[in-house]
Image: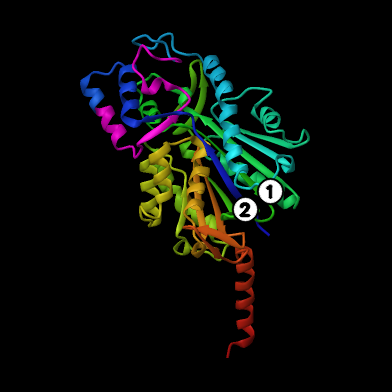
Amino acid sequence: MPSYLGAIGTANPVHRIAQPQIAEFMAQALGFGDADTRKLRALYRVSGIEHRYSVLPDYGRPNGEYTFFPNTPDLEPFPSVGQRMAAYRREALPLAVEAVRNSLRQVPDVEANSITHLITVSCTGMYAPGLDIELVQALSLRPDVRRTCVNFMGCYAAVNAVKLADAFCLADAAARVLIVSVELCTLHFQKSPEEDHLVSNALFGDGAAACLVQAEPLPNLAPSLALQAFHCGLEPDGHDDMAWHINDFGFEMTLSSYVPKLIQRGIRNLTDGLLNSLPVQLDDIRHFAIHPGGRKILETIETELGLTRDDNRHAYRVLRDYGNMSSATVLYVLRDVLAHATPADHGAPVLSFAFGPGLTMEAMLLQLAVNSEQVAVGGEQLAVDSEPLSVAAQLRQEKIGRAAKLFTAN
């Protein structure tokens, strides 16, 4: 039997900043002249992002009104990694708590003390005692809740958290797992004109996401996702093309222009590796939850797999409204899939991808499950089936059907 993921709650900082405003901040911080500023503005215009969220108001303010960066022309003395980690510790917990409360609000029958496992995910800050312990205290979780921290894995880390949660539920049918991802990417702005930094400064935003995973459909009035299969790929040639290092002035991103080519080279094998043992073909899938690592990455996957922009609509919406929030982002995309699901989508497969350092590529196959007797759609209560036929069950039936033909063939 599959595990089920649902009740995805999200939270963002109060500072919602338009992409053109951030471009002006960057141009000034980098000391760009008119020609370079025009090029930078063009980069931000074609990013596919309209606005991002940050725990720092500075990106939307003029120099002289900054609260984190120095109010000097060159932002010197540039904030140290210690100062950035102090900001992370101050800001991460409230955002994570808000995301969890937005998750649990969707399932009023689920009490915090019924959670057996807690998985925290982050690559933008660390400290100890950490976010996991602070969440136990802030949410009044059981002191014996089993805690796991997935740290510094990058944009694909939430998929690893989901795989862990699935394993917990397969091992113990009574497990109820809370996953919490919080990423404060904008703390790590790097004042450098290198291409990697220009691109990452144009993409990343702050956000948190939380969800529940358990062995049966969640007791709520909205769809959930049955976890059917996982597959991981590694393109070692991209070891140095996407990386994440700690330096003296924050965490430094390496994000080369070769990344889309690496994904193009590996995405078909990743997809085949996931689907080959299942009774599902790529042509059967109409719902996609792809991590929007950038517009070029989304377009590359569309070209290689024969998808349309509409197939990828959930990723584009998240990219437009939030940017890339590292590990939290794929949960935002899955939330968008659930938010737009209807009873007609019941049992439909969902293909999800995420990418990160290594170059690591993760794939998940999920299945939309309308798990309550009634679902509110457009104000109406529509009756639906209680549980979809799992991929495993479909595979068994297909094998039985093939075996039966051996006895009935003329």
- Could you say which quadrant of the image residue 322 lies in? top left
Q: Secondary structure at mark 1?
A: loop
Name the quadrant of the C terminus: bottom right
- Pointer 1 and pointer 2: residues touching (CB < 8 Å)? yes
From where the camera sits, is residue 228 visible? no
Q: Earlier in the sequence, mark 1 or mark 2?
A: 1
Colour option used = rainbow
- Whether 30 is drawn above or below 358: the answer is above
Residue 342, percent from left and from top = 49, 60
- Could you say which quadrant of the image residue 278 lies in? bottom right
- Whether 278 is drawn above or below 108: the answer is below
Q: Residue furthest front?
A: 379
Q: Is residue 40 left or right of residue 298?
A: left
First to last magenta residue range? 39-68
Q: Residue furthest right?
A: 144
Instruction: Residue type at mark 2: give it.
Output: Asn
Q: Secondary structure at mark 2?
A: loop
From where the camera sits, is residue 96 visible? yes
Instruction: Residue type at mark 1: give it.
Output: Asp
- Look at the image and say whether residue 262 sits in the magenta stretch: no
- Look at the image and say whether residue 44 sits in the magenta stretch: yes
At x 59%, y 42%, the residue is 103
User: Disc number at residue 220?
Assistant: 2
User: Disc number at residue 109?
Assistant: 1
Residue 335, percent from left and from top = 51, 47
Q: Nearer the viewer, residue 97 or 409?
A: 97
At x 55%, y 24%, the residue is 91
At x 74%, y 40%, the residue is 113
Q: Nearer the viewer, residue 156 or 143?
A: 143
Q: Residues within 10 Å of mark 1 (few under 14, many from 20)?
A: few
